[in-house]
Image (cartoon, grey):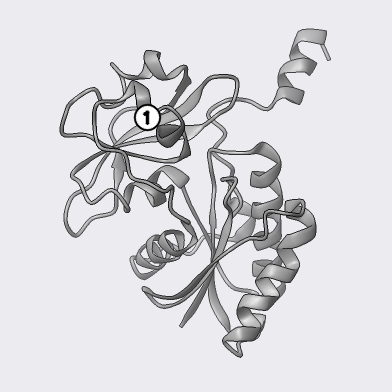
């Protein structure tokens, strides 16, 4: 059973094709074009290389954030469209979980660049035989404010573009370079699908952590 996965939450977005839990290929999305323009071609190119049609896909998977609001909306909407068109399930996977799988540690701090001098931060526990799970709630704040909340312990390993950007604030190991996560999204989604999770495409929701600027502007204006 084939899994097609997409990540548009990070600047280095990616697509991946997997056979059940085995990743066949992870491909970086062309960063020279806007995500809405480059996405259909990159998905088609990946499938063509493996002589796969969209109708051959049994499960779709998408990174649900946090990250770029525009990227989140486009990525989720694109995979929802493919899942609806083919009648197949779509599983959403948080970018925190996907990134944590690359740390090879039992305690992982994930920092994703949130711009404005802030990071989206979460602390995750990674236990053998189980998917990473968050310890406490995800936060968005300046790096210094998160050190006490998200992984001040020496044993914590950090991963994510926010951790790389602000590595001078950290004394712990940082995974570099920031990995492409679509393959991890595919693996985690497959595990959940095998466990019985097969939500309808419209059930997928983005994980924002911080509300979009447009929403905040409407609130301030009383709209």
> Where does residue 135 sit, x and y in percent of width and height?
28, 32
The reply to whether residue 53 is visible in this rendering is yes
In the displayed structure, does residue 131 sit left or right of residue 24? left
In the figure, 185 relative to 68: above or below?
below
Asked if residue 186 is positioned above or below residue 65 in the image, the reply reads: below
Q: Is residue 107 left or right of residue 67?
A: left
User: Which quarter of the image is occupied by the C terminus?
Assistant: top right
Number of residues whose C-alpha sits closer than 10 Å to that of mark 1, classed few (under 14), some (14–19) or many (20 or more) = some
Between residues 137 and 71, which one lies in front from this camera angle?
71
- Which residue is rendered at x = 36% and y = 73% of the image? 21
Describe residue 36's horizontal placement relative to residue 113 as left or right.
right
Under circle 1, the secondary element is: helix
User: Farthest residue toward the bottom?
Assistant: 51
- Is 85 drawn above or below residue 98 in the view shown? below
Q: Which residue is located at x 48 percent, y 56 percent?
A: 180
Residue pointed to by mark 1: 167
- Name, please, the residue furthest toward the front: 168
Quarter of the rendering containing residue 154? top left
| Residue sitting nearer the eye, 208 or 174 | 174
The answer to whether 153 appears left or right of 142 in the picture is left
- Residue 112 is situated, as x and y percent measured from the top left of the image, at 47, 35
Give the residue drawn at x 67%, y 46%. 71
Residue 103 lies, in percent from the top left, at 28, 48
């Amino acid at each position: 059973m084939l899994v097609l996965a997409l990540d548009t939450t990070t600047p280095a977005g990616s697509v991946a094709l997997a056979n059940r839990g085995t990743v066949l290929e992870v491909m970086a999305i062309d960063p020279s074009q806007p995500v809405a323009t480059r996405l259909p071609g990159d998905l088609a190119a990946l499938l063509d290389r493996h002589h796969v049609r969209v109708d051959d896909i049994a499960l779709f998977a998408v990174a649900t954030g946090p990250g770029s609001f525009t990227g989140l909306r486009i990525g989720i909407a694109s995979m929802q469209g493919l899942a609806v068109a083919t009648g197949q399930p779509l599983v959403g996977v948080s970018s925190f979980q996907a990134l944590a799988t690359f740390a090879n540690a039992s305690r992982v701090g994930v920092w994703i660049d949130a711009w404005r001098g802030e990071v989206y931060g979460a602390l995750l526990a990674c236990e053998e035989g189980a998917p990473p799970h968050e310890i406490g709630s995800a936060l968005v704040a300046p790096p210094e404010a998160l050190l006490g909340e998200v992984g001040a312990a020496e044993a914590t390993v950090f991963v994510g573009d926010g951790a790389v950007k602000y590595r001078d604030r950290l004394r712990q190991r940082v995974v570099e370079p920031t990995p492409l996560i679509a393959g991890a999204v595919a693996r985690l989604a497959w595990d959940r699908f095998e466990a019985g999770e097969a939500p309808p495409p419209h059930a997928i929701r983005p994980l924002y952590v911080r509300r979009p600027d447009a929403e905040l502007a409407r609130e301030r204006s009383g709209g």
